Image (cartoon, helix red, strand yellow):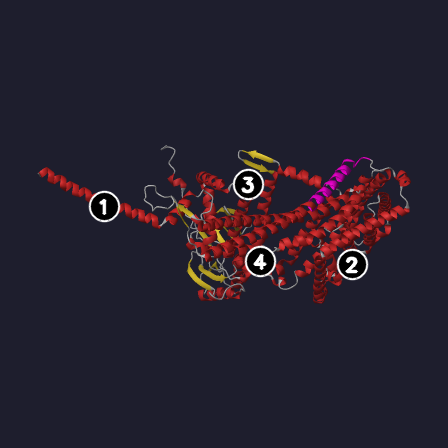
Amino acid sequence: MIFTDKIKSNYRYLRIILLFTALLTGAAAAVAQESPAENSNSNKAAAAPAGVPTPLPVAAVITEADAALKKTENIKNSLKESPGIAVIQNDLPQLKSEIDARITETSQLLSARPSLETLRTVEQEWQAIAKKIPAWKDNIRSQIGVYEGQIKELKELRELWRRTLDSLTKPTANDSNSNTEVNSGSSADAVQVVEIPREVVEKIERVLRSIDETQTLVEKQQSALLTLQARVIKEQTRINETLASIANVREEALSQLFVRDSPAIWNAARRTDSAASISRETSDSLSQQAAALGIYISRQTERFILHAFIFLVFVFILFRFRRKMRPWIEDEPRLERAFTVFRLPFISGLILSIMLSSWLYPQAPRTLSAVLGALALVPGVVFLRRVLDRPFFPILYAMVVFYFVDQLRAITATLPLVTRVLFLLEILGVIIFLIWFLRSKWLSQKIPVSHHRIFTVLKKAIPFVLGAFSLAFFANVLGFVSLSAVIGNGVLGSAYLALVLYAALQIVESLIIFLLRVKPISTLYMIREHRALIEHKILTVLKWAAAIIWFVLTLGLFSVSQTIFSTLKNIVAAELAIGSIAISLGDILIFLITVWLAFALSKLIRFILDEDVYPRINLAGGVPYAISTMLHYVLLLGGFFLALAALGIDLTKFAILAGAFGVGLGFGLQNIVNNFVSGIILLFERPVKVDDLVQIGTHQGVLNQIGLRASILRTVEGSEVIVPNGQLISEEVTNWTFSDHRRRIEINVGVAYGTDPRRVIELLTAVAEAHPDVLTDPAPQALFLEFGDSSLDFQLRAWTDNSDVWVRMRSDLSVSIYEVLNENDIEIPFPQRDLNIRRYDLQKDEPSNEEN
């Protein structure tokens, strides 16, 4: 019975558990049926492969669509042509036309075997043209890269919105459960379609259309840029091919420099073309050069306008200051020569503006260079006629004639025989002129003393120049045309260059001389006190700069600059490896130059501070010297570290090495470190300052310098004592001028007994008051000190604020005291002693012989 009750009870519990389980199962099935779309989407998302964008949820479609439309709009706005691309598209056709004209001219020139100097000029022109191409290519390449990034971004954006649209509009199927009961007539799978608002679908389709339109525009712009890039590369290829042809001809000419490259002149004359052929070729050459010049002018019109504006500015400035500076000539007649630049404002302005032609006219054709050279040479000769004396005029006139003959040879460069004959005639004319100049007695008598040294140098140099032209003449006659052209053109070109540089140097020197006399520069203390020194330094730098420019350009005229500079470059770049550190001669030169520049900069800044800054600022004594000294150390230290960086030394490793090295030095060089630190303390604390009158031990004098390790004391006797800085800090130092320059002078005086002390005090005080260097405050004072053994002792005390002359003042006062005492019959006694002689009988004290 009990067992049956237990079974019934357990059965009741089992039924409750089964009922609860059935309820849970039904609830789960209902939830699964209510959200089939969400489960489907989540499954799809989970199943999306890596790298494929995840479709956007419905709630984020509108917001993200607006952002996508804005992004495509921004990309469309960025497709506007950039200024750099617009410049390329505008300049490329003109550049192509110029290249076409120059290629034709250069081809004819190369076929005529021109001189090395002509090849160098033509090569420089083509190199100037080629300089612009790399910048164009970089600009186009960077813009193409931008378009590629935009296309990639648009493709990714389109894929995202396409997948989003597919995920929202594609039907989804629910798999039927075979264990679930279904009504009769229903299929095994039930298909459901998710309803999406039409506005959302239209928004997505609008985004896709905008993306497609933007991508089409970007691809179109990219295609146009690729076409432009191909055109630029094509022109660059043409330029490189022309430069390669010029280089080949130059190398061939250099290799055959000492080889006969043409027949002798008497044989070449037989092969000459007819006059009609020469005239036709000359006309064609001139037409080609004129065409190239016209194309260049059309491309660089704004630069010609800028040149004219700069010229007018120079002329206006020179005119403006001419009236103002004329009175200065009356005060300083030596400025008469420098004033020439203001007397000739048009000529001076033209020369100054033409000196900027290399910057104003890049890629200038040979015709324009010849015109600019003539515009610089002829005005330079006119200007130098006002500066030089009359005996030098023949040189100036001859230079102008020879220059125009050179330009005539340049025009007929495509006609080898004509050019050769003109060159022979020119060399012959130079030889005749040099012989006349060398043997002219009239010139020797007319040379003034001021230019006698220049004339002597010219006479010594003329035989060498004459020998060079003679060699060039005979080389040309015998058929060594290239060698003749190198020698003759090099000497003539260097002479033209020297003439133009000398004229420009005279103009710049004149401008600087007057600039230093114009406000506000003339109001500077350093200009007023050291104008002559500053003029000399500036003019020296300008002369050296002109000499260096002349030398470098002359090497180019002789066609050896490239060889020399490449050799020097190889020598300088040669490295010496020491462990992991590689040092070259160039690094060492850069190190030395950097250190030298640090010293020069420090010297310049300290000069400016001492001469023009400190006098305008009320600083305590010793502060200017301390500032200048610390600034000097900082600049030298900075220059040293920059020099180390230029050597390629890692400053981090150097700091560690310097720290370890410093510890070792701290033990071995304690005194030096102590003196160095003491020097810094002296600069900041200033117990003694430069120009102080100090006494250190037995040495007394003026402190001239406070250095890194020691200071220099100049004694009264004139000797210089090197005092370690540590001694100035640790030992007792008497500074007579620490707070002021006043010093008391003490003179001891003794008079004979019986003299009225009050009278002596009056006389001594009067002597001190009569001296001009004795201060009235504090007033001089005479004191009665004591009764001496032989005299009444007095002391005169007087103050002076000129501590440099206190020794002389002491002497002057002593002489005046002696004269006053003598005038008043006051005796200056000398020490007196009473000597008492006592007789002493030696015989009384001597023992008798008998007793001994």
Point 37% across, 36% down: residue: 847
- The quadrant holding residue 269 is top right
How far is mark 2 from mark 1, CA to CA? Answer: 125 Å
Q: Is residue 846 visible?
A: yes
- The local secondary structure at tag 3 comes to loop
Question: Residue type at mark 2?
Answer: Arg
Highlighted range, magenta:
235-259
Within-10-Å neighbours for mark 3: few <14, some 14–19, many 20+: few
Question: Residue type at mark 1?
Answer: Phe
Question: Residue type at mark 3?
Answer: Gly
According to the image, label 4 marks what residue?
Answer: 611
Q: Earlier in the sequence, mark 4 or mark 2?
A: 2
How far is mark 4 from mark 1, CA to CA? Answer: 106 Å
Q: Earlier in the sequence, mark 1 or mark 3?
A: 1
According to the image, label 3 marks what residue?
Answer: 648
How far is mark 1 from mark 3, CA to CA? Answer: 84 Å
Q: Nearer the viewer, mark 3 or mark 4?
A: 3
The tag on residue 386 is 2
User: Could you tell me which quadrant the C terminus lies in?
Assistant: top left
- The local secondary structure at tag 1 comes to helix
The tag on residue 20 is 1
